[in-house]
């Protein structure tokens, strides 16, 4: 039995509803448009638009937009990724109509006045400078630029100072016409409502929106060859990222790599990397791995930060752990424990209803369906030791790994 309901409007916009017996509602509006959809030289445009959506519409100024939900104690925010733009809000049950009214207004009736474009350009330039002052953040962006060199997936979501300074209203209009496709939009709600009444509410605010079914033309990135790059920065310690192109969100081994990633360097203090490098050798305060599946590719990487004299050893220990997974089939007991840990973490994550409804909305966009929790568990439990070995040899192949190091610059 499904734990959610979906209704599609005539214009293609979908309503996703997950019932929750709570006075608190979590809601989001997701558009399948992100940094990878930007035209050449327009780096940062998707994120620029996300900021400007909160500035002025045909009937509201900035203060009226921001106060529309905050005046009733709601939390309103937004973010941009390589593939999505998401606006979300958490609020008391009775204020959902306020949120829907605001979402419709800013997404479909923003005016992007020149004075706001100039003002927000300065804000984003400050944001770019702020990220450059955080090497643990900046190295992730630079790593992806190496991993997807020559492809829009390698573009920094924030853009560059040069690209942002050149963005203008015609760029915004062209991007939204090409990418704000009503058939690639989901309005999602987690709360205590009757589905029939929710459909009527959504029809009232979104039913009149003109359909836009512009086709997307995303191109998958090419395979890469191994490389090691060192950049010198005015920093106190070494920051390192190594990784490779990984499986897409539709790949049959996605669940297997999610499990392997969690075993290797995922959440918690008992991951292999944390036990070996931090606990056993006391080398790095932070050591973690991540796997991000995208629609036609994926990103796997390991990040660590450590003192300059320990960086070489840290890198050797990371490769030692990867080699163990490539050379030795995981035991039945280890595999069972890894599955139990991962499933438990997924179950706990269900408590974060905002993250859950956003994840469900993305799944609806990508696959036009949403796995139940039991289906997710079943996919994890179906992963075999042989698959773990195969995944490790494919994803952790040294011939396919990029290594990026930020090292302290000599005074």
Image (cartoon, rainbow, N blue to C red):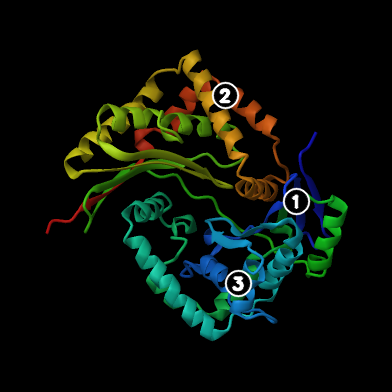
Q: Nearer the viewer, mark 2 or mark 1?
A: 1
Q: Nearer the viewer, mark 1 or mark 3?
A: 3
| For marks 1 and 3 on the same chain, the one whose residue lies earlier in the sequence | 1
Give the percent coordinates (x, y) of residue 172: 58, 74
Q: Residues within 10 Å of mark 2 (few under 14, many from 20)?
A: some
Q: Which mark is residue 66?
A: 3
Q: CA distance from mark 1 to mark 3?
A: 25 Å
Which residue, given by chain and number where applicable, does mark 2 sit on?
383
Q: Vertically, is 172 above or below 145?
A: below
Quarter of the rendering occupied by the N terminus? top right
Q: Which mark is residue 16?
A: 1
Toward the left, the furthest residue is 411
Q: CA distance from mark 3 to mark 2?
A: 46 Å
- Residue appearing at x 47%, y 61% in the figure: 157
Q: Is residue 403 visible?
A: no
The local secondary structure at tag 2 comes to loop
Q: Nearer the viewer, mark 3 or mark 2?
A: 3
Q: In the image, is 124 to the left or to the right of 311?
A: right
Give the percent coordinates (x, y) of residue 250: 61, 40
- Residue appearing at x 76%, y 55% in the figure: 14
């Amino acid at each position: 039995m499904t734990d959610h309901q979906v209704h599609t409007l005539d214009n293609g916009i979908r309503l996703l509803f997950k019932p929750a017996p709570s006075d608190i509602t979590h809601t989001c509006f997701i558009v399948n448009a992100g940094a990878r959809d930007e035209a050449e030289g327009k780096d940062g445009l998707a994120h620029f638009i996300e900021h400007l959506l909160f500035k002025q519409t045909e009937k509201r100024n900035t203060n009226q937009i921001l106060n529309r939900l905050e005046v009733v104690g709601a939390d309103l925010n937004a973010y941009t990724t390589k593939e999505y733009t998401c606006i979300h809000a958490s609020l008391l049950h009775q204020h959902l109509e306020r949120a829907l009214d605001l979402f419709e207004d800013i997404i479909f009736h923003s005016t992007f006045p020149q004075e706001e474009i100039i003002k927000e350009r300065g804000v984003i330039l400050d944001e770019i400078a702020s990220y450059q002052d955080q090497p643990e953040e900046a190295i992730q962006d630079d790593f992806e630029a190496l991993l997807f060199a020559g492809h829009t997936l390698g573009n920094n979501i924030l853009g560059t100072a040069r690209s942002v300074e050149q963005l203008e209203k015609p760029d915004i209009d062209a991007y939204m016409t090409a990418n704000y496709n009503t058939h690639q939009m989901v309005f999602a709600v987690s709360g205590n409502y009757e589905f029939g009444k929710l459909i009527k509410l959504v029809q009232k605010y979104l039913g009149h929106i003109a359909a836009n079914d512009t086709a997307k033309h995303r191109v998958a990135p090419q395979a890469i060859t191994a490389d090691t790059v060192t950049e010198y920065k005015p920093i106190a310690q070494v920051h390192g990222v190594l990784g490779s192109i990984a499986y897409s969100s539709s790949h049959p081994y996605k669940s297997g790599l999610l499990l392997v990633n969690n075993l290797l360097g995922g959440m918690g203090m008992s991951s292999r990397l944390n036990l070996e490098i931090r606990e056993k050798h006391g080398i790095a305060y932070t050591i973690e791995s991540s796997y991000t599946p995208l629609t036609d590719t994926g990103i796997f990487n390991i990040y660590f930060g450590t003192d300059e004299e320990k960086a070489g050893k840290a890198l050797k220990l990371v490769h030692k752990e990867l080699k163990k997974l490539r050379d030795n089939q995981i035991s039945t007991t280890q595999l069972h424990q890894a599955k139990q840990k991962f499933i438990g973490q997924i179950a706990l994550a269900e408590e974060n209803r905002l993250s859950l409804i956003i994840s469900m909305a993305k799944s609806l966009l990508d696959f036009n369906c949403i796995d139940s929790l039991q289906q997710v568990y079943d996919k994890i439990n179906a992963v075999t030791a042989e698959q773990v070995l195969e995944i490790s040899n494919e994803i952790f192949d040294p011939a396919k790994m990029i290594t990026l190091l930020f090292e302290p610059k000599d005074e």
